Amino acid sequence: MFLAKLITFYGLILLFHAVDAEDDNNNQHRNSRRRVSLYDARNLLKQLFISQNAKTRSGDGPRARPMVVAKASHMKKKKAFCRISPLKQRIFDIGCRPKMILNNYCYGQCQSFYIPSYTDDFGNSSSSGDSSTKKANIEEAAFKSCAFCKPHQS
């Protein structure tokens, strides 16, 4: 990751130098050389980042592009804290016996997030394997980052 940022940084410096060299070759006056605006540089850097990321990820389409989840500046402003309280829940449906489960109620300011894998409208995962394995993987993935919040039977 550091190497990619370093390459991007030096690529941007070379881009500025190439624009200046092109203007010098056209024998323009030194004070009237065209400078790359901050807006143009940001767009060029964004295109470079997307193209580098698309090359490193497998697949085509929207999954090949990076997805912004949260800005780092927003994540660092507040101190993270997470509290857990035990919670008994009674789950029931009409015509069935109720079931008591011991769950955990999580609250607070947490700076983590979970991005689920793609599932279609029928609940089928995009990965290969039988349907029972897919269903178990989806259920486990929901509590992977927060295992102590996973509900269990009392």
Image: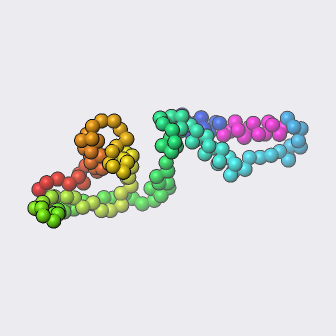
Q: Quadrant of residue 77?
A: bottom left
Label the magenta part by its dominant secondary structure.
helix
Q: Is residue 23 above or below residue 91?
A: above
Query: Would you say 9 lies left or right of 136 here?
Result: right
Query: Would you say 81 lies left or right of 154 here?
Result: right
Between 90 and 14, the one nearer to me in the picture: 90
Whether the magenta-drawn stretch holds residue 21 is answered as yes
Q: Position of residue 29 (x, y in %)?
A: 89, 43
Between 26 and 138, the one nearer to me in the picture: 138
Q: Position of residue 59 (x, y in %)?
A: 48, 36
Between 3 and 120, the one nearer to me in the picture: 120
Q: Position of residue 8 (x, y in %)?
A: 60, 38
User: At x 84% / y 37%, what residue is drawn?
Assistant: 24
Query: Would you say 26 lies left or right of 105 here?
Result: right
Q: Quadrant of residue 44?
A: top right
* Total count of labels: 0
User: At x 65% / y 48%, what residue is drawn?
Assistant: 43
User: At x 30% / y 62%, what residue is drawn?
Assistant: 107
Whether the magenta-drawn stretch holds residue 87 is answered as no
Q: Which residues are magenta?
A: 12-24
